[in-house]
Image (cartoon, rainbow, N blue to C red):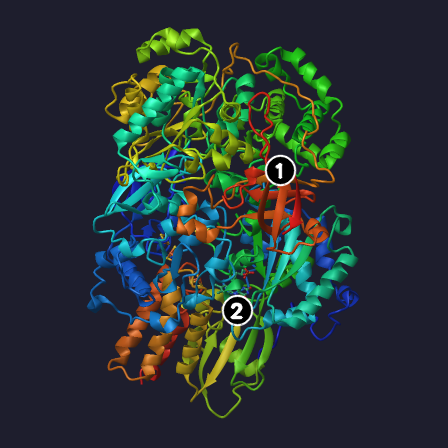
Amino acid sequence: MIKETRITLKNVGKINPESIDDYIAAGGYAGLKKALKMEPFSIIDEVLDAGLRGRGGAGFSTGTKKKFTSRSCQTCPQRYVVVNADEGEPGTFKDRVIMENDPHLYIEGTIIAAYSINATKGFIYIRGEYTGSIDKTRKAIAAAYERGFLGKNILGSGFDFDLELKLGAGSYLCGEELTMLESLEGKRGHPRIKPPFPAEKGVFGAPTLVNNVETLSNVPLIIANGKDWYKQFGTERSPGTKIFTISGKVKNPGYYEVEMGVSLRELIWDLAGGMSGDKPFKAALLGGAAGTFVDASMLDERMTYDNLREKGATLGSGAVIVLEEGDSVYDMLYNCLRFFKHESCGKCVPCRVGTSMLAKGTEKLRNGVPDKRALLDQMVHESEIMAATSLCPLGQSPILPLKSAARYFAEELTK
Amino acid sequence: MPKIVNLTIDNQKIQAPEGANLLQVAKDNGIAIPHLCYHKKLTPTGACRLCVVKIKDMRGLIASCTVKVEEGMEVTAFDNELEEARKYLLDYLLAEHDESYDGSYHDEFRELIFKYALDKKENRRFPSIWKELGYPKDETSPVLTYDAAKCIKCFRCIKACDEVQGKNVLSFTNRGIVSYIIGGFDKWGESECDGCGECIQLCPTGAIVEKPHREKINIENGIKKVRTTCPYCGVGCQLELWVKDGKIVRSNGVEDVSPNYGRLCVKGRFGYDYVNHRERLTTPLIKKDGKFVEATWDEALDLIARKFTEVKEKYGRKALAGYASAKTTNEDNYLFMKLVRMVFGNNNVDFCTRLCHASTVTAMLRSVGDGAGSNSIEDYETSDCMLVTGNNMIETHPVTATFVKHAVQRNGAKVIIIDPKWTPLVKDAYIWLQPKLGTDVALLNGMINVIISEGLINQTFIEKRVDGGIKAYEALKELAEKYTPDYVEEITGVPAHLMIDAARTYAKAQRPLIATGMGYSQQVTGTHNVFCLLNMMLITGQVGRVGAGLNPPRGQNNVQGVSDVGTSPFTYPGYISVEDAENRRKVAKIWGVPFESLDGEKGLSTVEIMQAAYEGKVKAMYIMGENPMITDPNLNHTEEAIKKLEFLVVQDIFHTETTPYADVILPAAAFAEKEGTVVNSDRRVARMRKAVDPPGQARQDWHIIAEIAERMGKPLGNYKTESDIWDEIAQTAPIFAGISYDRLEHHGIQWPCPDKDHPGTATLFLEKFNTPNGLGKLHPVDYAEQTERANAKYPFILNSGRILYQYHSSTMSRRNKALNDFANEAYLLMHPDDAEKCGFHEGEMVKITSRRGQIETAVRISEEVLQGELFMPFHYSEAPVNRLTRDELDPYSKIAPFKISAVRVEKL
Ligand SMILES: Cc1cc2nc3c(=O)[nH]c(=O)nc-3n(C[C@H](O)[C@H](O)[C@H](O)COP(=O)(O)O)c2cc1C
Ligand code: SF4
Ligand code: SF4
Ligand code: SF4
Ligand code: FES
C-alpha cells in the first residue's frame, strides 16, 4: 500500500495561500536566500545533479536546459524566464493546485531559476480561464515585491528581477513553448520553427528559459534541501515526485503527489480508492489528448519517463483518465482527435488538414466502410506521416492516442 | 566573407557559404526540392513541409528551408519515403483546395499536382472538403481578389507585405483548417493596403490575383513580356510588362535587379492603363479660328518650322524657348536641347527640375560639385541613421522607403524626420522634428550649434576635405553661435531636447544618409536649406565613404537624366557650364556646327521663360511633355504669359491644362511605346523598351524633334535608332562615356562611368569632391524670416505636395481606374482646432484665397498638420493649388516656393 509523498504540495491546505508570512513560516524563501549566496553556475549544477526533469510533459533535463540558456549569447543584454502556466492538456490540473494553494512556491522557484541564468525579467504565461490561479498569483507577486523578493537588488544581493503576469490567449497550442513566445510578443498563436530553441533565441530574440509550474516548484526544495535529499525520491533516472491528476471511473478522483515510479495499479487502487463501480478496469489514457491508451497489461509498469516510453506509452503531464469495462475507447479516441482538429493552428499542411482527415476517418469507422481494419491501418499511417512532417509537436501528437488505441483496442474500433 | 563549406545532396558534392539556406543551396545547384511556402525574399516559414529532407545524424524528416548548411552535411533530398510524404502533403492540400483554374496566374501548386500525378483523381486518397469549409472571397480591394478556397496558407503574402514592403497589413483569421487571410481587421478594401501588389506577386497560387484585365490573361497563350523602367517616380523600378493583343494587361516587378528587386508601388503595378486610354492624342491638331482641327504631320511640322523661323527672324533668336520633359527619355531630351541650342540658337531650355530640386542641385553643385545623390538606394537598408527632410518618401518614393523600413525594422536603424507635416514614415521614426513652415535654416543651424558645442565635429575631415579647412569652419561656428537650442525652439517650435538628440544621433552615426525632398527645396530659401544640410554633413564628415552622404530622391523617372544630358539653361551634357568655351568648342565639333553658332550666354529657366513671355520677350515656345498650366507657380500669371505667346507648340500624349493654349498639338509616344534610356535618383542609367505601338499617328518624341529641326533647315544628325543618339550623348558627357546600350541589357549602370571597363560608381566623393579644387565648400547662411507670412487677412500658411496614388499633374495617373479607386478627390488638410474655430465640418466645401488667386475644395480635418498650417495635394486640376502659390524665386536656383503661401479659408 503506497502513500502520497507531498513535497511540492506540502503546504497545500496547511497555509493561507494569500499570506506570504504563512509561506515563510513554513520554510518558504529559504531556498532563494540560500541561492542568492551561491554562484549561479553551482545552482545549475545542483539542479542538474538532482536529476530534475521537465514536468510540462517532455521530461527534458531542467539543469541541462538552464545550462544552455545561461551559456548562449554572452553578449545579449537581456535574458528571460518564462513560466509555462497555460495548463491546457485535457484532464490535467496539477499546476492549478500549486498556483491556487501555494503560489509563492513556484514564484520562488522562478526567481532562483532567473538568478541562476542571470535573467532580469520573467513572464508567467497563465491560462486565461484560471481565475483562481491568476488571483492568487497576482497577490503573491505583489507580496513578493513588497518583501524585496522581486524587483531591484533582491534581498541586498545586487540581483534585479521583475516578474510579469500574462494571460493566455485561450488556445491549447499556446502552451507549446515556441508558440507561447510568439504569443508573449503579441503575435498570433503560430509556432516558430526550431532551431533556434528558446535557450538561444526566445522571447524578443533573447535567450529564454521556459519551464513548467511544477518543474519550477521543485527548484526551491532542491536548493534548500540539497540534491541528495531530492534524489532519495523516485528512481535513478526519474528522481523526485510527480503530481498525477486522476479522473474517470475511480472512487476518489483528484490529484496525488507520489514518488516517480509508482505503478498505475498503485495509483488507482492505493490512492484513488479503486474503480468507482463494479465493472473491471478497461483502459487508461495517460497524459491527456497528447497521451496514450493502455490496457490492463500495463497496470504494473513503473510510471517513469523512460520506462513508459520504452513500452510505447507516455507519462506526459500526469493526467490519468480511467475507463471501466463497457466504456468506449472509440469515443475517447474520437474526442482526442476532434480536439486536435480544433486546436490545430493551421500553420502547417499535415496537421491542418491531417487532423481533419483523422477525425473524418474516425467517423467513417462507425459509418460503414467495407474494410475497417484497412481504414484503421491507413489512419495510423497518416498519423505517422503527420508525425514525421508536422512543424510542431501538436501535429506529431495524434499518433499517440491513435496508435496506442489501435494497438490495444483494434477490435473495438473496427467493430 | 562567410566560410565555404562542403556538403552533399543526394551524393552530389556541393560547396556553399556556411549558414546559407539549404533549400536555396539545393535550388542553386539544380536540385529542385519541391516547396511552396519558401521564397528567397522572405524569412523561412516551414508551413508547407514539402521541402522535407533527411540529414545524416539528425532525427526524422527536416524541412530544408529551415536548415542552414554546415560542413560535412549529408543530405537526402529524394527517396521513396520523402516522395511518399510529399505526395501526402499535396494530397492534403488538394482536399482543402478549389482546383478550378482560369489561366490568369502562375500556379506553383498546380504544377506540383501535375508533377506528382495527383491531377488524376484515382491517385488521391482524400476527399475534397473545401466546399464545406465556408471559405470566403474578398473582392473589396480595387486591385485584387482574395479567394480563400484557393489559398494554401503559405504565409507568403503576409510576409511579402510585412517583411518586403514593411506594411504588415495581412494576417490570418480563425484557426486550423478554416483559417484564411484577411486585410486589416476584416476586409481588404477597408484595410491600410495601399495596393502595391507585392502579395500578388509572391502568392504561389490563384488565391490573390490582380483584378485589372484578369479575363484577358491566359499565361499559356499569347502573352508577350517586355522589361522596361517604370514611368512614374525617380526610383526607376524595373518592370515586366505583359502585353496581350497589343495592349498592356499586367505589370510585375523584375526580381533580382536593382533598384527595386521585384518590389513596386501601386503606380508602377497598376498605373499603366493610361497608355491605352481612349483620350490619347492620335493625330496632329492645328488651331484654326480658335478650334483644333486634325492635320497631317506634314502640315503641322511645316507650320511649326515656318512659325519658329519667322519668330526668330522677326524678334531675334532669344525669342524662342523650350520646355523639355522628365517623363521622356534621355535621347528625346538630348535632341530637344540640341534643337534649342543648335536650331533656336539660344540656351532657353529647361524642364520641371526647376520646380522641384533645382535648389538642391544648385547647393550641391556649389558645395560638393555634383547635383546628384551621392549613394545607392540600397544603402538605406544598411544605414544606421537616416535624416529625412521635407520628404514624404513612403508616398513619393515608395520603393526607396522599403529599404528605409528594412533598416528600421530589421536592424534598428534610427530615422530622424524633419517635416512640418505628418508623413507615414513617422510611424517608423526615432525622432520627428516638426518645425513651423519655413524655419528650416534656423533648425539646422541649431543642430550645427549642438554638434559644435558638444565637440561632435570631425576635425580631420574638415582639415583634409573642406575648402579653407578649419578657418572656413570657424566662420560657420561663429554664425552658428547664436542658434542655441532655446533660441531655435523659439523660432521653430521644435523642443530643444529633441533637436539636440537628433543632432547627436546624426553626428555619431556610422552610416548616416540624408534624404532631402521637395519640402526643403521648394522654398525661397531652398538653396539655403540644402546649404545647411551640406554644412552639417561636411563638418561631421558624414560623407565620402560608402553608406554616408546626401541624396535627393527624384520626382519623375527621368529628372536626373534630363539634367544629366544637358537640358538646362546653364549646363551642357554632363554638367559643363554653357559658358565653358572649350566644351562648347568640343560639342560644336561633335555636332558639326560652327563654334560661334552656339550661344555662350546662360539661357532662361522655367519660370523665367514664363516671365519673359509675359514681358513679351519670348514669343514662341515648344513644350514637350510638360503641363505648366498646373505645375507652374502663380498660375494666373502663367496663363497670361502663355496667352501672350505668338506661337505655342505642345507635344504630349493627352490633352492637358496647357494644350488649349497651343497653336499646334503634336501626339507623342508614351513610355511603353519607346526605346531609350532614363536615369534614376541614384544615377543609374536604365533602359526603356517598347512594348506596344503608339496609337494612331502618334510618333516618337525624338522623331518629331528631328523633323522640326530638319524643316528649319538644320538637321540634328543621322540617327537610325535611339542607341545612335545615346552614343553621341556618351561622347558629349564624360560621366556617360563608358555606357552603351549593350551594357544595359540586364542591369543599370550608375554614372560616372568614364570608360567601357568601368563598372559604374555606387558612391560619389570617396576620394574627392567634384568641385574644381576637389574640396567641399561650406556656405554659412543665416535664418531669414519668410517674406510671405500669415496676417489677419491671410491667417493660414498653405503647404502643398504629392500623394501616393496620383502623380504630378495627374495627366497619366488619373487615367487609371485602379489609382482613382484609391484616391480621386482633392482636399485641404486642416488641424482640428482650426476647423473648430472656423466652424468647418469634415468634407465641407470651402474657398481658399491667396494674394494671387482662389480655389475651392473639401476640408479634411486631421492632426497631420500643425495649427495654423494647411496642406493640399497639387495633382487635381479642379482644385489647382498653384493658383495660390507665388512665383517669387529662390535667387540662386530660381525655384519657386510651392510650400509656403499665406491664405484664408472661408465657407462657400
Ligand atoms: C501542444 C502543446 C501544448 C503544451 N502545453 C503545455 C502546457 O500547457 N503547460 C506546460 O507546462 N507545457 C506544455 N507543453 C510543453 C511545452 O512546450 C514545454 O515543453 C514546457 O513548457 C517545458 O517546460 P518543462 O521543461 O518544465 O517541462 C505543451 C506542448 C505542446 C506541444
Ligand atoms: S503541427 Fe499543427 S499546431 Fe503545429 S504548426 Fe502545424 S498546424 Fe500548427
Ligand atoms: S493568399 Fe497566396 S500567398 Fe497568401 S497564404 Fe494564401 S496562397 Fe499563400
Ligand atoms: S497589396 Fe501591398 S499593401 Fe496591400 S496587402 Fe498586398 S503587399 Fe500589403
Ligand atoms: S518550403 Fe520548406 S516548409 Fe514550405
Q: Is residue A185 left or right of residue B207?
A: right
Which labelled disc corresponds to residue B419? 1
Could you tell me residue B884's position as x and y percent?
Answer: 59, 38
Note whether B347 is above or below B63 in the view shown: above
Q: Is residue A239 left or right of residue B220?
A: right
Which labelled disc corresponds to residue A370? none
The image quarter in which residue B367 lies: top right
The image quarter in which residue B304 lies: top left
Could you tell me residue A61's position as x and y percent?
Answer: 53, 57
Looking at numbered disc 2 in the image, what kind of residue is underneath it?
Ser
Q: Secondary structure at mark 1?
A: loop
Instruction: Work out how far the residue at label 1 is from the one at label 2, CA to CA, in angstroms.
Output: 58 Å
Residue positioned 33% across, 71% down in the render: B129
Disc 1 is attached to a residue of which chain?
B
Neighbourhood count class around disc 2 (C-alpha, 10 Å): few under 14, some 14–19, many 20 upward: many
- The answer to whether residue B405 of the structure is visible from this angle is no
Note whether A165 is above or below A358 in the view shown: above
Considering every residue shown, the one lying at the far bottom of the view is: A278
Which labelled disc corresponds to residue A317? 2
